[in-house]
Image (cartoon, helix red, strand yellow):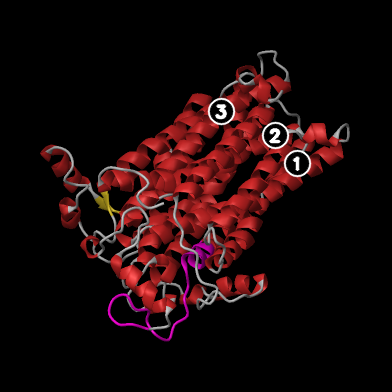
Amino acid sequence: MSGWLPGSRSTTELAQYITLTLALGGLQFAWSVETGFGSLYLLSLGMRKSLVSLVWLAGPLSGLVTQPLVGILSDRCTARLGRRRPYIIGSTAAVVVCMGVIGWTKELAGDRPTLVVWLAVASFYVLDFAINSIQATLRALIVDVLPTARQDKGTAWASRMIGVGNVGGYLMGFLDLVHLLPFLGSTQMQVLTTVASFVLSSTVAVTCYFTHEKPISRMRPGSQDSSGLQALGAVFTSFRDLPEVIKRICRIQLFAWIGWFPFLFYGTTYVAGLYSSAHRSSGHSDDELMEEGTRAGSLAMFAQAISSLAFSVVLPLFTYSTATASRAAMAQSPRSRQGSRLIRKLRAAMSVSLSTMWTISLALFSACMFATLFTSSVGAATWVIGACGLSWAVAIWVPFSIIGETISGSNGLSASELPSAGSFVEHAYEPVATGDIQMNVIDGTSDDVSEHSHHAENGHAGGGRGARPSGHSGLSAGSILGTHNVFIVIPQFLTAFLSSLLFAYFEWIEGSESKSDPGAQHAHQIALVLRLGGIASAVAAYYSWRLFR
């Protein structure tokens, strides 16, 4: 789709960033519906908290298998649509079907409570597998399309789109959609799932239409057929060959997401418990308190989403990437020359590296989780959750930016032509300077990359910067991002099992005690899980501080 928009190069690049990352916003909208309202929806079907925790094992199971497998299989895909888009389109269709089943579970299962629960649980499992497939290919698409010098901007735009998706998802949950959009369903969940399906489908359509992928040759080395098990095994055995910096990022993510998963899955439920406790003498039924508490929790998560979106716009202005190398280099970059002299001086004085920003955000998130020790009202909880917006904006931006630069910056090759990860180990990170790449408009390739691709496809090793180092088998963006995702989903296994055990213990205790204030007990139990996540986040902050030291 090269040249599809008239105007200056900066305008064309902006259009590319928007269309390339728009689908991530739609995906986040759908995911926020699942994470923000899934727990309360399953509880409303009669499931116990301990069993609901086990349902969320769908996330790590799908992430552990789907993202690495789809990543490496899409690396080898020779379809005319390209490597990533066939998986994106097929997985989007699966999400739409699952959303429909979740919204209308009771209508489909009829007056059979057990079937209702099993149908909902099965739909959530398939939904998680499909969402992970879309996420894997969309992230790999960014690395494929953009050259090294634009990876930071690309992931920053991805963070903004995810922020917009978060805002939209939690705003929809806060509104009374049955009264606003009665023609889309008779319950809040039905309208939510319908809107989420439409948003995801439309944003994916835009990204797939305007993003240009070059199909790879069936005879290209590395595209040979192999079984899914062989492909999946290759991902897990390739960790030792990863670039050293990506190994360190994986370790940080392992601890960071032990903190994030309880927050994402139980944040709304935590506020709902506090709301129920504060209004237990209002005379409202348990169902009414649940619905009102859900809206209060949605408002708190909406505040966090607004905060995250704002920080995703502001923070990139005050950070410099590894490819930029220093504050001095940042001060000379085109982005820094925009604005008044005062703003330029302020940015130069306050700018920090990506890894430092990551450390600050993890430390802040840990502090917020421990702040639940002193939180006993809905208002205070809303402030604590809202303050996590900065940390979330960084979590969905910085690690992917560093990984993208590391992949794309290897000897100036495009991400799709990544050499063996073992070639990075001696020097953890060698970015290509911004001025080294002359980009073709919109498809994000460089003359050097094109020349390299020509040599590679004709079986020539070539010489100079564009050549693939000899003696190494390639690890592409999908493979590396899939391996990295394993260290994001493993924490969900840990938190799901731990929280399930804790909730089961609390349910056993509650069985022999009177429930004078069940809402407060509910919030206290979730706060304990959040604080355990805060400890893990503090460990992640330490490792992040040592990332490039």
Kind of residue indicated by mark 2:
Tyr
Per the image, the residue denoted by label 3 is: 172
Measure how far apart labels 3 and 1 are at the Cα level.
21 Å
Residue 465 among magenta residues: yes
Measure how far apart labels 1 and 2 are at the Cα level.
9 Å
Identified at 64% across, 33% down, the residue is: 194
209 to 461, vertically: above or below: above
Secondary-structure class at tag 1: helix
Identified at 18% across, 57% down, the residue is: 329
Q: Tags 1 and 2 in contact by the CB under 8 Å rule?
A: yes
Kind of residue indicated by mark 3:
Met
Per the image, the residue denoted by label 2 is: 41
Per the image, the residue denoted by label 1 is: 120
Q: Tags 3 and 1 in contact by the CB under 8 Å rule?
A: no
Secondary-structure class at tag 2: helix
What crowding class fits label 3: few (fewer than 14 Cα within 10 Å), some (14-19), or many (20 or more)? many
